[in-house]
Image (spheres, rainbow, N blue to C red):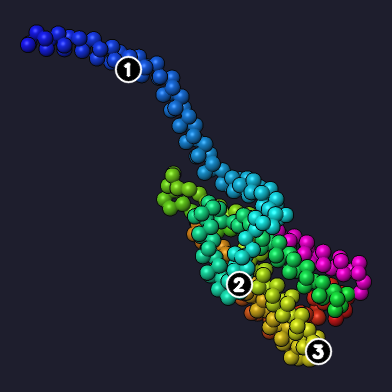
Amino acid sequence: MRSSTTMAAASIRPSVAAAGSAAFSASSGSGSGSGGYSTTHTSGSRGRNAASGGGSASGTQAALHMLPLYLRRIVKWRQMDLEYTAWLMLQLCTNPKLAYRHTTYHKQTHNQWARDDPAFVVICSALVSFSATAYCIAFGHSVWHSLLTVLSAVVVDFLLLGVAIGTAGWLLSNKYLRASVPGGHAHAVEQHVEWLYAFDVHCNAYFPLFLLLHVLQYFLLPLLLSGGFIGCLVSNALYAVALAYYHYVTFLGYNALPFLEHTELFLYPIGVLALLAPLSLLSGFNPSVFVLRVYFGSS
């Protein structure tokens, strides 16, 4: 019985030795593969470090990469979430804090702060064109002048001015308002404001202003252009409230980003408005008359 056990053990040992030899040779033979993995892992770590050190350049590249898709969706109505856009527009007028709370949800689900749906811009452009057409019907002199006015209201006043304001907010927030990484932690992810998000903030703030200075002002024109003190008072109050609310919604947009600090900077223009509004009223300046003269040459 002992001899049979010894023979069995002797027969197993060569197999185990062969298996161990094969495993050792495979391990030594895969050394280059292991080295390759280490090299790849190291290069990946370097890539991540370079990406985190890229700063605003990586943020700019991400924004530029996203723009073609954003622009392609403008002509695809079926891909636009019109129902959500209508809800967002309502919240911006009634509860803007709730509207910006969804910015955090969008970051968690889409890994970006900016909207990837151009529906808001498309609807705003259409509304601005309708409003400009209504003003042209009331004050326009010719069809050609009316077409130029509508085009200027959409392209210049809304889009190009929005691009300029969004770019200014994007540069200001990324350069001066980003909070430093606590303790300089090497593995902390450095975040930046996306350019498209800064443009979204302008569009969000523009919509309530549009309702006040385009729609409501249109229906108040008989009073605003009456030439009396009441018309001047209502016009100054209307423009002061609209511009103050614009800067307030802008502040909420940047304040919603957890990596920014001192965002109360965007509220400072409201203080300037509070100082200028009484002076404008005392001087008899009527903003509504002034704007109509700029666009149509007379009130």
Horizontal side, residue 284 vs residue 244: left or right: right
| In the image, residue 249 above or below residue 217 | above
Mark 1–mark 3 distance (CA, rounded to whole Å)? 96 Å
Is residue 158 found inside the magenta-colored segment of the image? Answer: yes
Is residue 126 found inside the magenta-colored segment of the image? Answer: no
| In the image, residue 40 above or below residue 127 | above
Q: What's the residue type where badge 3 is placed?
A: Ser
Task: Give me the residue at 24% from left, 14% from top.
Answer: 16
Which of 161/109 is in front?
109
Question: What crowding class fits label 3: few (fewer than 14 Cα within 10 Å), some (14-19), or many (20 or more)?
Answer: few
Residue marked by disc 1: 23
Residue marked by disc 3: 226
Magenta stretch: give its range.
141-164
Task: Give me the residue at 86% from left, 76% from top.
Answer: 137
Q: Which mark is residue 90?
A: 2
Q: What's the residue type where badge 2 is placed?
A: Leu
Q: Quadrant of the N terminus?
A: top left
Q: How many marks?
A: 3
Q: Position of residue 212 (x, y in %)?
A: 69, 77
Label 2 SS: helix
